[in-house]
Image: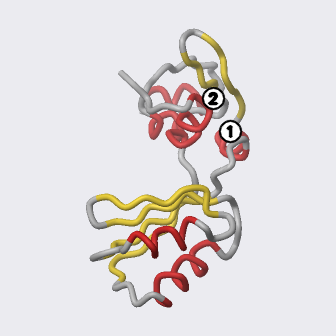
Amino acid sequence: DGICRLRDEGATVVYTSHYMEEVEQICSRIMIMDGGKTLAEGTNDELKRMISMGEKVVIEVAELPSEVLARVRALPHVLSADVSAGSLTCSCEASPHNLTDILDALRAQGVALGRIYSEPPTLNDVFLEITGRELRE
């Protein structure tokens, strides 16, 4: 709260963190560094537009045969699709039809669906795509 108050009063604050959720909430300009090198900088929205992923779709599935997973992976705008712990996670390019295309492909194959949600990319997604690896402490 103190950092946000200083920021709102016009102070320049340099904030370093591995906690990207905090960075998204606190910072107006963000620099992503790895190994002491600057890889990207800009606003939260500018950084998210730098990567190919525009949306993440997660669907709970009881079972997903490999041939159905292959069909989902072949859909336009799907960058990757993986199944883990009963959930299908698809990283997609920005497109208004991602969710409906994926759901149509699953329904056509009779896949039972659970909870479904879609979310825009996070700063963690930006870091992963830019560096090719997860954040580390």
Residue pictured at 26% horizontal, 60% vertical: 85
Q: Nearer the viewer, residue 67 or 14?
A: 67
**Which dot marks residue 62?**
none
Left or right of 28, for residue 16: left
Q: Given the image, on which type of amino acid does mark 1 rest?
A: Leu
Q: Name the residue under label 1.
A: 47
Above-or-below relation of 94 to 137: below
Residue 61 picture location, percent across and down: 33, 75
Q: Mark 2 points at which residue?
A: 30
Residue 120 picture location, percent across and down: 57, 57
Residue 6 picture location, percent across and down: 54, 25
Spatial CA distance of label 1 from label 2 is: 8 Å
Q: Residues within 10 Å of mark 2 (few under 14, many from 20)?
A: many
Quick one: which residue is furthest to the top in this view?
A: 36
Q: How many marks?
A: 2
Of the two numbered discs 1 and 2 on the same chain, state the one appearing first in sequence. 2
Residue pictured at 60% horizontal, 25% vertical: 32
Above-or-below relation of 114 to 49: below
Residue pictured at 63% horizontal, 71% vertical: 75
Q: Cβ–Cβ below 8 Å for labels 1 and 2? A: yes
Residue pictured at 63% horizontal, 12% vertical: 37
Q: Nearer the viewer, residue 59 or 111?
A: 111
Q: Given the image, on which type of amino acid does mark 2 rest?
A: Ile
Quick one: which residue is furthest to the front in this view?
A: 67
State the SS at label 2.
strand
Quarter occupied by the N terminus: top left
Quarter occupied by the C terminus: top left
Q: Which of marks 1 and 2 is in front?
A: 1
State the SS at label 1.
helix
Q: How crowded is mark 1: few (under 14 residues within 10 Å), some or many (20 or more)?
A: many
The quadrant in which residue 100 appears is: bottom right
